[in-house]
Image (cartoon, rainbow, N blue to C red):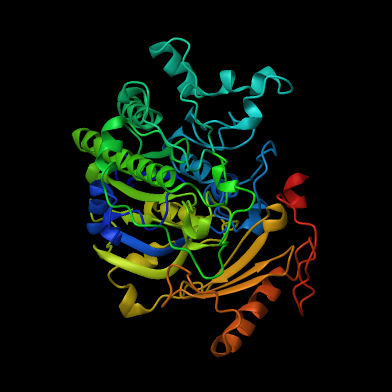
Amino acid sequence: MNRNKPNVLLITVDQMRYDCLSIAGHPVVETPNLDELARTGVRFDRAYSATPSCIPARAAIFTGKSQTGHGRVGYQDRVPWRYDRTMPEEFAKAGYHTQCVGKMHVYPARNLMGFHHVVLHDGYLHHNRNKYSIPVSEHYDEVDDYLHWLRRQEPGADLIDSGLDCNASAVARPWHLPEKLHPTNWVVTESIDFLRRRDPGKPFFLWMSFVRPHSPLDPPQAYLDLYEDAEIPDPPVGDWAMTSDPGLEGYNPTTSRGIVPKRRLKKATAAYYALITHIDHQIGRFMQALAEYGEMNDTVILFTSDHGELMGDHHLFRKSLPYEGSARVPFIVNDPGNRLGLQRGKVVKEVVEMRDIMPTLLDAAGVPIPDSVEGGSVLQLASRAAERQGVAWRSYLHGEHSQGSQSNHWVTDGKEKYVWFSQTGEEQFFLLGEDPQELHNAIRDESCRERIRHWRSVLVQELKDREEGYSDGERLIVGRTPAAVLSHVRG
């Protein structure tokens, strides 16, 4: 048995906010198992998704590259994934038995991306559900493993049975089938089955990838009951946010902005929290199975989300925008067997990102990190020796998302954030250290003029060689046509 190398478990959820952890001080959400991973591991308090939507975030996880490196700077389906070096491929080459269970969101959907095996459920994706233009081989009925499994348990079942759209941002209802049939339970059931079927002579790399708490907001009733009578705080609304909703956008069940009826929003928020607690309990179930198989102390664990969820902050919903609720995520590293010398209970303030996952996990396993990787191993920040030795780390992060008139770029060091909307030229500046909820846009504050000038110049340099023409090296240029995918990926 190759026990000089640890097993590696990557747990990702889809669309979980950074603050939805009890141990991080959330007044309502219950996350006992994640709290324990943080209490006995290391929590990274300034973790971000540089391009906060599903596809580009996962490209960063798979490749360890920045958004300009992997080329996906917005959300666009059906662009082939062709990368020379991927995280599962590197683990496989190093002798690991590799598997993903749950969401991949690559194209084609059954692209293994270097895994030995994938048990797939990407959730509801519009492009592979339509019945009028997609090839049969790409249709959801062909590619999704959860749907085939579900129909064996519940003949005729489908993902639209509840009446909730996959992007229903402010509408919720309880899961309508037995809890064991929920996609959250299925991910853990299949992951436990991998523990049974794995090659016992190899260490394993398992990516357990949940599709919730992304909409639909459909927790089992028992979890919704936990929050039914909870005093859920109103979301923060900044002095820069919309104050009226003349188009009544808040009444759209899949809205990304607007003033949602208060009762509806409270129910949706309760359901979102309930989905998180449901995932937490199922993670606890997997941890028990891991211990029963005798693998707990030989497994390094990393938990995170691909991006956040605004959930009414500033009357905004969903993701892709530069605000904390959208771009900032939970990020925990745990090492039950104490192989890595982590400082247990430590809370790290340096800015980390999705591109850091691949080098971190390869580093934990003693697997060489490819030269193509642009991220860094966060283990150097998490060790007991980190503070004594002083660690060189990135001083800021450049984030962005192409999204029509809302296309945006931002830079942050976790204490300050400068935002530029490329199509309108609108700027925002937030002093996160004293205003963590981004309630005040300080872009016109005299006291911030020098800091704003500094961050604007940083962004000018970040964008000066971009093909869209956002910067000439001296200034930011408004109105250049944004692209969701850069030319070196489009081919």
Q: Is residue 248 visible?
A: yes
Q: For this rendering, which residue is in front, 392 or 101?
A: 101
Q: For this rendering, which residue is in front, 196 or 427?
A: 427
Q: Residue at x 71, y 49 (%)?
A: 485
Q: Is residue 374 above or below residue 387?
A: above
- Quadrant location, the N terminus: top left
**216 sits to left or right of 467:** left
Q: Is residue 26 above or below residue 278?
A: below
x and y percentages locating residue 400 in the rendered image: 62, 60
x and y percentages locating residue 418 in the rendered image: 58, 73
Q: Is residue 376 visible?
A: no
Q: Is residue 406 above or below residue 10?
A: below
x and y percentages locating residue 24 in the rendered image: 30, 61
Number of numbered discs: 0
- Quarter of the image for residue 469 reads bottom right
Q: Residue at x 79, y 64 (%)?
A: 479
Q: Residue at x 60, y 59 (%)?
A: 66
**126 sits to left or right of 331:** right
**234 sits to left or right of 141:** left
- Quadrant location, the C terminus: top right
Q: Is residue 74 above or below residue 102?
A: below
Q: For this rendering, which residue is in front, 266 or 190?
A: 266
**272 sits to left or right of 67:** left
